Every structure is written in structure tokens, then in C-alpha cells.
Amino acid sequence: MVDGKPLAGPYIGDINASHRFTHPRMFRSSFMEFFSRVHPAVPGLMFVPVIGYFGWRCATTAGLPLGVATLAAGFLFWTLMEYVLHRFYFHLAPTTSLRKWLYFYSHGIHHQYPDDYYRLLLPPILSFGAAALFYNFFALLAPAAAVPGLFAGFVMGYLYYDYVHFATHHAKPPRAAWLSPIANLMKEQRRLHMKHHFQDHTKGFGVSMPLWDYVFGTYGGR
């Protein structure tokens, strides 16, 4: 059901339309619908213990210099994955029925309904599965001593992205003068992200930071 009307299919209307302050139903199946929604507390509850465990393993096995380096590298690698996924998969051109379906269910619904409180974060079944895949990716390619730090940094980057994205849509910047650096950062992130939503979908793919937009020429600045 969308806005009180039955859901006609997986692809709703014009992919460029934006329906503000509405919360659509994605699936006819109540089971599928339940797992498509995520409370904002869930990613933190899931992944803060994961970060703590692998951060502890990093600290006890890698030593301080390697530990800090691998944490930073894992975080940076996440920001690259965020950019690549957002640009090349989440904005897959919907030129066929399959591509249209993939676009809508992975990201198009967010562009059509940007204020849906429970669909700003990746469903746990997908995020946990992706985390397992990337852990094995690091384990396959990196020295054993570097894996805990790389993975902890990677998950930290993902969690930072999740909550930055949520904050750009629903959090108000703090008003206290001593928190003005955080407020200014939040305002700038929101400005860039809203520009991506409502002005130019071909720019501003880095949600948590614009680093890779600068590198690859897709910065949606002033």
C-alpha cells in the first residue's frame, strides 16, 4: 500500500518523483515488509559489539602503529565502497525491467520517499551478510595480523555512514556554541546530500564525506 492505495507492483511511478513525508509499503508480504524496515538503533546494537571485539583483537595482536594504520585503512576502504556502490549500483540506470527492479528496491525507493524514517538504513540481514563477505575478503588478501583492524575500521566506516545518512534526513544540528563545528559539518553534509536528492543525481555520491567525489570529479559543491 502506498499513501493508502494498493501497491501495484515493484516499480512505483516516475523514478524521479519525490513523495515527501510519506511512508510506502514495499512488499505485499507482511513478512518481507517487516524485514525491509529498520529502527535506527538496530545498526548500533548489531555492530558496536563487533567493532569492540575486532578492535580488541587488533589492539592485542597488531600493536599500536599497525593497529592504528589498519583501522584507518579499513575506514578509508569503506568510504571508497560507499562511493562505488552508491554511484554504480544504487544509481543503476533503470533501462530494463530487471535493472528497474534492482534500482527501485535497492535505492530508488529512498529517492522517491526520502523521509521514510525506517528505510534510511540497510536491513540487518543484508548488512550482516555484507559484513561477513568483507571479513572474508580481508582475510583472503591481508596478513592475519592486519585483518581485525581492517575489519573493525571498515565496520566503523559503515556505521558512521549509516548514522550520517540518518542524521542528514532527520537530525537537527546542535545549537550550543561549543558544538558549532559539529553543527557546521552536519549542515554541510545535509546541503550536499539534499542537492544530490533534489537537484543532481549524478553528483554527491559520498554521503559520509565528499573525499571520493573530489577524486573522481563528482563533487556536487556550490
Image (tube, helix red, strand yellow):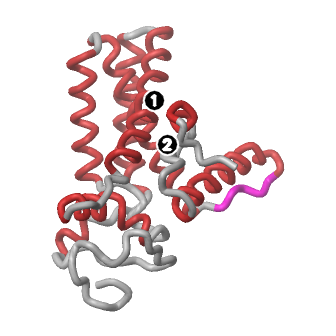
Q: Amino acid at mark 2?
A: Tyr
| Residue 39 figure quarter | bottom left
Q: What secondary structure is the stretch in magenta mostly built from?
A: loop
Q: Residue at x 75, y 43 (%)?
A: 181
> Which structural element holds mark 1?
helix
Q: Kindly report the distance in space between the C-alpha atoms of the residues bearing marks 2 and 1.
A: 9 Å
Q: Residue at x 79, y 53 (%)?
A: 176
- The magenta region covers 172-176
Q: Is residue 9 above or below residue 72?
A: below
Q: Amino acid at mark 1?
A: Phe
Residue 167 shows up from this direction: no
Q: Answer with mark 2 or mark 1, whichever residue precedes in sequence.
A: 1
Q: Confirm or deny contact between disc 2 and disc 1 (CB under 8 A).
A: yes
Q: Which mark is residue 75?
A: 1
Residue 131 shows up from this direction: yes
User: Could you tell me which quadrant the N terminus lies in?
Assistant: bottom left
| Residue 214 figure quarter | top right
Q: Residue at x 17, y 71 (%)?
A: 31
215 and 190: which is toward the camera: 215
Drawn side of residue 54 relative to residue 217, left or right:
left
> Which structural element holds mark 2?
helix
Percent position of residue 80, x then y: 43, 33
Q: Which mark is residue 160?
A: 2
